[in-house]
Amino acid sequence: MRFERREHRPAALVLATPLIAVGVALAIAGVLIALAGAPVFQAFGRIVTGAYGSKLAATETLTRAAPLILTGLAAAVAFRARLWNIGAEGQFYLGAIAVAAVSAHLTGGLPAWVQIPILFVVGAVAGLCCCLSRCGCG
């Protein structure tokens, strides 16, 4: 078997593929919830309410999702370059530790407009060093 890229992707296929994927995921989750003996639609309603039912819930959802989204985007860039990066989580953690350390000890007195770009660079360099060092985390 050999996979080949399509020369032209129909717009309907581009739009339908993610919708079908979400639908199948919800169907599988619904089956698992039903097998557990819980009411499916009530469970889905509670999931949505718990994630977006209040301003605090929405901000907590976004706070917890942001690192996952950014790590996934970083891995997508590597995959797009035809590189296999299986250490994205380790790179994320090392970058977070480096940013916390630099913020606490070196840039604490600087204004935010100076500190934030410096910390972005520190996190990126720490993740890059983890990737290049072959230490096992990246």
Image (spheres, rainbow, N blue to C red):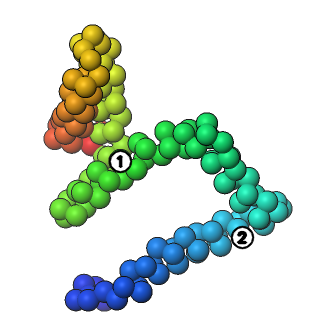
Provide the secondary structure element on which disc 2 rests: helix
Residue closest to the eye, 76 or 37: 76
| Image-quadrant location for residue 96 | top left
Q: How far apart are the alpha carbons under marks 2 and 1?
A: 30 Å
Q: Is residue 99 visible?
A: yes
Q: What residue does disc 1 label? A: 71
Does 98 appear above or below 67? above
Residue 35 rendering spot, x and y as whole percentages: 78, 66
Q: Nearer the viewer, residue 122 or 11?
A: 11
Q: Quadrant of the N terminus?
A: bottom left
Residue 31's mark?
2
Q: Position of residue 120 (x, y in %)?
A: 25, 33
Question: Tag 1 or tag 2, which sits nearer the N-term?
Answer: 2
Q: Is residue 128 left or right of residue 30?
A: left
Q: 110 above or below 29?
A: above
Q: At x 58% / y 74%, what residue is drawn?
A: 23
Neighbours of disc 2 within 10 Å: few (<14), some (14-19), many (20+): few
